[in-house]
Amino acid sequence: MDKETFRKFGYKFVDWVADYFEEVEKYPVCSAVKPGEIKDRLPSSPPLHAERMDTIFDDFDKIITPGITHWQHPSWFAYFPANNSPASVLAEILTAGVGAQCMSWQTSPAAAELEEVVMGWLRQMLGLPDGLTGVIQDTASTATLCALLTARERVTGFKSNQGGLREPLVVYSSDQTHSSIEKGVKIAGFGRENLRLVPTDEAYAMIPDKLEEAVRQDKKRGLKPACVVATLGTTSSTAIDPLADIGRICGKHGLWLHVDAAFAGSAAILPEMRWMLEGAEFMDSFVFNPHKWLFTNFDCSAYFVKDPAALIRTFEIHPEYLKTGHDSQVKNYRDWGIQLGRRFRALKLWFVIRSYGVEGLRAILREHLRLAKLFKSWVEEDERFELMAPVPLSLVCFRLNDGRGEAGLDEMNKQLLEKINASGAVYLTHTSLRGRYVLRLAIGQRTTQERHVHAAWELIKREAEELLKTSNR
Ligand SMILES: *Cc1c(COP(=O)(O)O)cnc(C)c1O
């Protein structure tokens, strides 16, 4: 591509994104394409000769965009949000432009030092203990895997990465834990059988006494407890495990405490939400995703550890071709996780934090929390609906309940969700709580306003009314 074409399309693409930000509300939130529909419109073999940028861009517009589900839509209430922001997108252009590989200090000193500084900022913003040191990972799944691997090494005296795992080690989490914990336990050599799902209370938070009971039982059976994964903000209902009580048990039994706060962690920038972190001094590691609720586009996961030396000892490897003269004075983040090559992710985080300021970020999160409380109050006031879990953050779990008994309610709510989403006006997803089918309305998209939440509620009520009229229960 010649430089004039690059410039021309560079401006055009920025215009496209700027228009997208303004107009995203016009699209159906969830793409309605059928499986295979996009593939069928694409050639199965690559072009032999260069194509014009016009042609490629046209195809993006015609073929790709209809298959996009619009995560940046203000009526995005599904899963958890995956936010971007103007500052974050602009920074990504620079990151792609400089195209640096940030595996060692030497391979881009500014990337390594900016990462150190920005992670220090995040630690302060969340009010995490001073003793924690941060590193950016791609996802919470990867960060949790790093935690499990480091816990494994610490409990075996750094012998299992030398001789392999010789005895079964046990991991504990609540029965509400994210699937990435099960995946991590499965691939880090613990084995799925050695993951204990500790029962939860009526708020879906881990019961500390049950944790201690499970640890004691495993010890009695001659198994070696290694790690507890506590969750702040479970994926199903944003339940918050009691860190302080869990931490004391970990301290007593010498267990690694990893905290998965993938979504909820961002809320700790609000002083009024710091109660979640009571007991943080017990944490060995902590992860949260700025790519969820801190307006830094995917991927950017913030991982904090108490003992960086243990992390490095678990991962470091020193091939001759990677040695540099600065290794004793600098941080080489390739030794702080699984991958060698690393993207320059600190840049977008730096741009986002500076362009909003901490107070600017707090204001958006506070509004999301307010909107969730508002939606919760509407659900509570309407006798046809039922709140299914406490609302400590910005996720509301609820269902339609016609009062005619449990049988058939799951199916009715499933139909309700399908009808709501088929409208294209909003996107909600579901979960299962104690075996019951539950609708989740997750507020956290950067541009969501009260009118969007209100419109969603009106739509939900309308579809529910229809359903109750036609149902022959
Ligand atoms: C979203 C989520 C994850 C997974 O995050 P990734 O960054 O996609 O790996 C893990 N734990 C919880 C509680 C989550 O909500």
Image (spheres, rainbow, N blue to C red):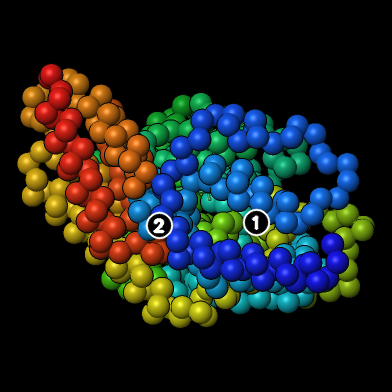
**Left or right: 342 with respect to 267?**
right
Residue closest to the eye, 356 or 210: 356
Image vertical order of residue 429 relative to residue 467, above or below: below
Which residue in the protein does label 2 denote? Answer: 25
Q: Quadrant of the N terminus?
A: bottom right
Residue closest to the eye, 47 or 225: 47
Which mark sits nearer the N-terminus, 1 or 2? 2
At 59% from the left and 68% from the top, the residue drawn is 15
Image spot of residue 348 (x, y percent): 60, 70
At 75% from the left and 71% from the top, the residue drawn is 7
Residue closest to the eye, 28 or 116: 28
Q: Quadrant of the C terminus?
A: top left
Q: Amino acid at mark 1?
A: Leu
At 66% from the left and 51% from the top, the residue drawn is 58
**Left or right: 299 with respect to 231?**
right
Which residue in the protein does label 1 denote? Answer: 311
Circle 1 SS class: helix
**Left or right: 198 with respect to 302?**
left
Q: How many marks?
A: 2
At 50% from the left and 35% from the top, the residue drawn is 33
Find the residue positioned furthest to the right: 320
Spatial distance from mark 1 to mark 2, Cα to Cα? Answer: 44 Å
